[in-house]
Amino acid sequence: MNLQSPILSRLKKDAGTIFHSGLEAVEPETAIYRHCKRKGDNLFIGNKNYNLSKYENIYLIGAGKAASPMTFAMETLLNDKLTGGVAVVKYGHFSKSNTIKIIEAGHPVPDENGLKGAESIMQVANKAGENDLIICLISGGGSALLPFPAPGITLEDKQTTIKILLACGAAIHEINSIRKHISGIKGGLLAQAAYPASFISLILSDVVGDDLDIIASGPSVPDSSTYKDCMDIVARYGISKKLPYAVFRHLQNGLKGLIPETPKPQDPIFNKTGNLIIGSNMEAIRSAKIKAQNLGYNTLILSSMIQGETREAARMHAAIAKEIRKTGHPLSPPACILTGGETTVTISGNGKGGRNQEFALAAAIDIDGHENIVIFSAGTDGTDGPTDAAGAVADTTTIKRASAKKTNAQKCLSNNDAYHFFQSINDLVITGPTHTNVMDLRIILVG
């Protein structure tokens, strides 16, 4: 039984096209070449010129889902001037490299390979001298891929802590605040280790608002969070008794002033450190907008900063779609609404899925029975939760088509089992690794 009309089929196809246009805008190599140019011995990064001939050694380090293609592009620019380096990427995200060692490691839960990678990066930072240059390439996933536990904390402690934070529904800003304070590399500590070498980070942002101290937990920027903030987060989610004892004790000792705080803005180490964002969620959204307009849609960028509980955000997006359908506000059909950001899921079931799949499922329930609406939600990194899908696409026939397959939408939503729901009707969005990461992209189309 085919319940989808030609209009719905076209809307779903267009949603995928719009999404891929957004991905192209934040392709890592393109982003590097857009912001970095070399003329002879002069490397121009943003508005700053680095005279490569004055450095004794030039090292390249990196971490994140996009680190491999970013590394290849920078290797190509530096060529004969490059001394060496190391980058850590998520399993399956290795692409190509000339001379830099690429280590694949675990994400979102860190593993031993990540620990080895972080140790290798710290070795580069520690051996760099005053006349050396370190170029650091950071992208989404960098936090999990750089596990370097503070003294007294084990990798297993960190793994357990991250699992607890992910499960309790903590926002990425909150997770990273704790990550920085139980780490020996995050929260400006990588820049501290590299000092007095010159240090520049090129960053693909995967956090709402592009806050530098949050992206990959800010290894090269001053840390605005404190041990007090960490203890407030622990109290807010009631996880003090769930955390490993070593982690809780470390945070308590930090609050008491028994452990030094992370480097703050006034620290002189940052006089030789720079940071430049070379790609963001808004860049992907702007490119998606142009594609949607070229496809004939009246298009509006609503926000790149959508946060909060996934199901509530989904209902808000569904409400906008229904408003367009009924009254023509805020746009008249054919309409496209674009949003970005990163929502959170409070896990209460034992199903399989991710925030984008759950978003699409909650939206599908709300638009059921209406006409010619498609809601598409996917992660720009190609991975949504612990699944092989980037997200899912819902339309006004989704619930009926699933019912015909004996799949109950409300039951799957309650069990956090959006993956199997959309798998049953072949509406998962599967891209494979995209080798970039600038949070999520959501597309509402009303025909």
Image (cartoon, rainbow, N blue to C red):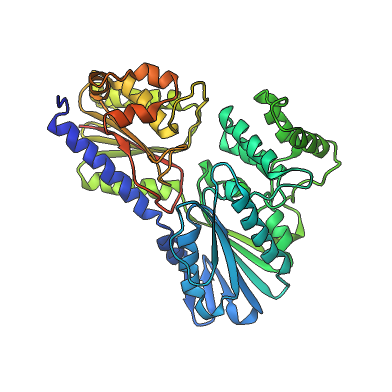
Q: Which residue is drawn at 73% across and 58% down?
A: 192
Q: Is residue 236 above or below residue 392?
A: above
Q: In this view, does 168 lie above or below 254?
A: above
* Residue 359 shows in the view: no
In this orientation, which residue lies closer to the viewer: 26 or 410? 410
In this orientation, which residue lies closer to the viewer: 243 or 4? 243
Q: In this view, does 33 lie to the left or right of 300?
A: right
- Which x, y percent locates residue 53? 60, 82
Q: Which residue is drawn at 28% across and 42% down?
A: 16
* Residue 50 shows in the view: yes
Report which quarter residue 310 is drawn in: top left
Q: How many marks?
A: 0
- Which x, y percent locates residue 171? 57, 33
Q: Is residue 42 left or right of residue 390?
A: right
Q: In this view, does 23 lie to the left or right of 348?
A: left
In this orientation, which residue lies closer to the viewer: 313 or 179? 179
**Which image quarter is the N terminus in?**
top left
In this orientation, which residue lies closer to the viewer: 105 or 238? 105
- Which x, y percent locates residue 398? 26, 25
- Which x, y percent locates residue 321? 30, 27
Q: Is residue 380 above or below residue 363?
A: below
